[in-house]
């Protein structure tokens, strides 16, 4: 099976350096452009299925990419929703690396989800993927935390989180296949999608 992963496009919280957790925020104009670029980059791929988190930032990214694959079914799977960070969602954690590490190590201390529960649901999702036909080509559109969980499952280590809109091919060795450069927001009033 071939696995591709795309981290959702940028949101206003991403642009401000704030963490989401399970806050349900929309893509901003840059995020829509990133999703469209990822879709254009992947348009030659023939995906068996596209899986996405139910959170709007991931789902909208998947819908935009999916518009390049009109015959591929888009499946919303709540098991790949982002890690619940409890009352730390929407906060800036980059300023204090020790606090950030603690929040992600023990989000349950802040009213969030236990890491074991998060890993369990992502592993359940991955185990279901393994039941698909061997020749399947799968696209997963989700979150940074979901990517970290998958990297721990597949490679037994935490890998660097992709940038918003970045594509990673997950195989024997993961590798980025589309370095998404920072892009500017489009001219005000001009819709990208």
Image: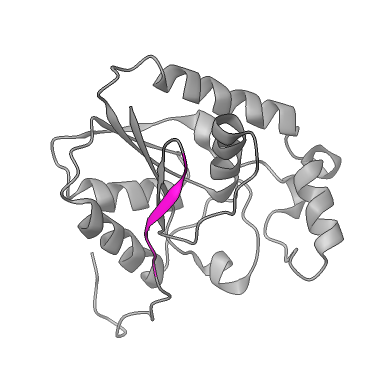
Q: Quadrant of the N terminus?
A: top left
* Residue lying at 79% horizontally and 43% vertically, measured from the top left: 105
Residue 59, placed above or below residue 27? above
Q: Quadrant of residue 187?
A: bottom left
| Image spot of residue 95 (x, y percent) | 78, 71
Colour convention of the picture: one colour
Work out whether 146 lies above or below 16: above
Quadrant of the image containing the C terminus? bottom left
Along the line of sight, the residue nearer the viewer: 142 or 54: 142
Residue furthest to the front: 172
For the point 75% across and 47% down, which residue is it? 104
Residue 170: say if magenta.
Answer: no
What's drawn in magenta, residue-wise?
Answer: 173-180
In the picture, measured across the screen, residue 185 lies left or right of residue 80, that is: left
Q: Nearer the viewer, residue 84 or 132?
A: 132
Q: Position of residue 94 (x, y in %)?
A: 74, 67
Establish if 145 lies above or below 64.
above
Q: Quadrant of residue 131?
A: top left
- Looking at the image, which is closer to me, 127 or 171? 171
Identity of the residue furthest to the top in this view: 131
Decide: is 120 above or below 47.
Answer: above
Residue 175 appears at what percent x and percent y?
A: 43, 50
> Image quarter for residue 5?
top left
Which x, y percent locates residue 69?
Answer: 17, 43
For the point 53% across and 38% down, which residue is it? 81
Horizontal relation, residue 48 to residue 122: left or right: left
Image-based side of 152 in relation to 51, left or right: right
């Amino acid at each position: 099976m071939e696995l591709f992963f795309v981290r959702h496009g940028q949101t206003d919280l991403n642009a401000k350096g704030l963490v989401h957790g399970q806050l349900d925020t929309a893509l901003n104009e840059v995020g829509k452009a990133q999703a469209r670029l990822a879709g254009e980059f992947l348009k030659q791929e023939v995906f068996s299925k596209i899986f996405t988190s139910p959170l709007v930032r991931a789902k909208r990214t998947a819908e935009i990419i999916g518009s390049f694959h009109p015959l591929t079914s888009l499946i919303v799977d709540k098991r790949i929703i982002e890690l619940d960070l409890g009352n730390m969602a929407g906060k800036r954690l980059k300023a204090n690396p020790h606090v950030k590490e603690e929040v992600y190590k023990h989000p349950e201390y802040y009213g969030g989800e236990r890491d074991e529960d998060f890993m369990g649901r992502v592993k359940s999702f991955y185990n279901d993927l393994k039941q698909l036909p061997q020749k399947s080509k799968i696209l997963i559109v989700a979150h940074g935390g979901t990517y970290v969980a998958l990297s721990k499952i597949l490679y037994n280590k935490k890998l660097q989180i992709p940038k918003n809109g970045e594509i990673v091919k997950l195989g024997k060795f993961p590798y980025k296949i589309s370095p998404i450069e920072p892009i500017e927001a489009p001219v005000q009033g001009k819709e990208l999608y």
